[in-house]
Amino acid sequence: MVQKLDVCIRGDGMVGRTLALLLARQKLRVGLVSATPQTVQDVRAYSLNSTSRSLLSELRCWPDGLHATPVQHMRVWGDKGGFTHFESPTPEGLTWIVDVPVLEAQLADAVRYQAEITPLCAPEAAALTVVCEGRTSATRAELGVNFEVLPYQQNAVAARVRCSSPHRQQALQWFHRGTHGLEILALLPLGGAQGNTASVVWSLPPERAHHMLALSAEAFGAALEQASHGVLGQIELTSERAIWPLQLACADRWTGNFADGSAWALAGDAAHTIHPLAGLGLNLGLADVSELAHVLKAREAKDYWRSVGDRYFLRRYERARKSDMAPVWLACDGLQRLFAHPNTGVQAVRNWGMNRFNQLAPLKAWTMQQAMR
């Protein structure tokens, strides 16, 4: 088949659309394959760091202040007295809580007005195919890529809520080991600096997660008030609730070749997933496509004679991203396991550690700088 495209991107979610826009700026002919339209209300919100913000701002896709709320404070509670607090060193914020439907709409508009991007209903031949289909990627399975999955005994429950007290630009998180296992509740500020709405991400043991899903709106709000110790006052559910299983996963191969010799690469959740406790998920996917676009940009100078599917580029991309991802996987998995540990001695040590960490200003500052990037 004659290749009319340089790059075919399978999956038009936020990661796929961002990559399409980055490659179109390099004057590459890009095909973007649409996924099945979502028929349920999208209640997600993501925490995006300064690197992601800079990337999306360059593409003119950063939402306005009502839909990208800067976080000035992060407060994290452990069980039995553990606590740590991060305060933004600048007025800009530690991170931003971004309304997913708004960001998706802005990316879709930008794609629509980019002449180098061709919307597709099905994949077409290209020198390079980038798979951005998400954690259940059909293409990844067809390629025979081993997706190593470590399931956590937790499901995430997500929703939107309205609180009787303003959030004051605080991101709040509670770790609690209950009778059924580890529970992690995050309330993330929405609606701008003066808002009183929040995104809920509640990681719960599966049985308890499905119980929360079955509760009435009033009972669910009451359960949130109790779990958050009333920090934001009365809580009212304002959306549908979503649920999905949590896992740590990584593909053993991120790049390769089809039988016809053309190349493929994985990006975003098709390549890796982590626990949402650190709010890094979309940041890692955007870092993938930023790195891939960066290595392909080398063609504009000394490597202009190479194809976009050249193994030289793809090996660079895979090595760089796996190297950057390794410490993130270890840290997130380690925190989840530390707080899930049932031993009372371990529980005492981790809470002591949280309080001790909160007193070590240089270490806290270094940690904030790493997270913000």
Image: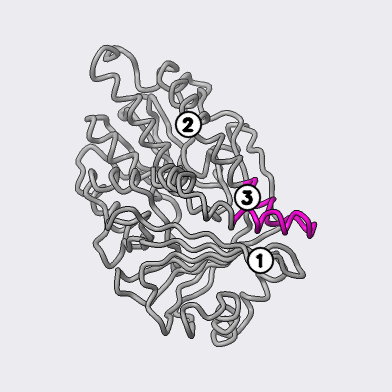
Q: Which residue is mark 1?
A: 79
Q: What residue sits 49% from the left and 82% below the top?
A: 235
Of tags 3 and 2, the one toward the viewer is 3
Image coordinates of residue 277 in percent, x first then y, are 55, 55
Range shown magenta: 333-354
Q: Is residue 243 visible?
A: no
Magenta-colored segment: predominant secondary structure: helix
Nearest to N terminus: mark 3 or mark 2: 2
Name which residue type carries label 3: Leu
Element assignment for label 3: helix
In terms of depth relative to the viewer, which is nearer, 219 or 177?
177
Dot 2 corresponds to which residue?
321
Residue 370 to residue 183: above or below: above
Picture quarter containing residue 115?
Answer: top left
Q: Which mark is residue 335?
A: 3
Q: Is residue 95 magenta?
A: no
